[in-house]
Image (cartoon, rainbow, N blue to C red):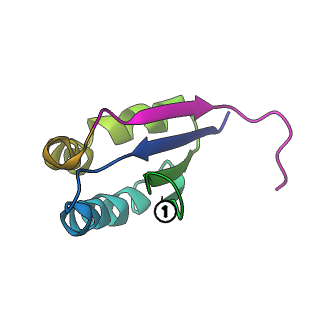
Amino acid sequence: MTVKIVAFVTVKPGADDAFIAAARICVAASRAESGVLHYDLWRETDGDRRFVFNELYTDDAAVRAHMASDHFKAFGLAARDLAAARPEIIATQPVDVAD
């Protein structure tokens, strides 16, 4: 069963460019993973202007493989110094999803 992850990250003031640079490396490598169907980075237009990762995986095993990947771990280390708080991560499973 597919798994959708939505992760919200608020970065420290002035850290946007460094965060985006680190995130782009992770996004590109993640898109190449066999179990990743969709992996995008967005930014809110209002409010805290959080960054939003929109991810879709083939199954739970693909999520675990992604989280164990070297590029994800490297991004996590980089983002830890750039984030203003811990990310908010929401994992979901499909109920009624269009093809």
Q: Is residue 97 above or below residue 25?
A: above
Looking at the picture, how far across and down is residue 34, in whole percent? 45, 53
Q: Residues within 10 Å of mark 1 (few under 14, many from 20)?
A: few
Q: Amino acid at mark 1?
A: Trp
Q: Which residues are magenta?
A: 85-99
x 37%, y 56%: residue: 30
Q: Is residue 23 above or below residue 57?
A: below
- Quarter of the image holding residue 33? bottom left
Report the residue marked by disc 1.
Answer: 42
Looking at the picture, how far across and down is residue 37, in whole percent? 56, 55
Q: Quadrant of the N terminus?
A: top right
x 24%, y 45%: residue: 83
Please tell me whether mark 1 sits on a helix, a strand or a loop.
strand
Foreground residue among 86 and 59: 86
For residue 17, side relative to residue 40 (left or right): left
Looking at the picture, how far across and down is residue 43, in whole percent? 47, 62
For residue 7, side relative to residue 85 (left or right): right
Foreground residue among 92 and 34: 92
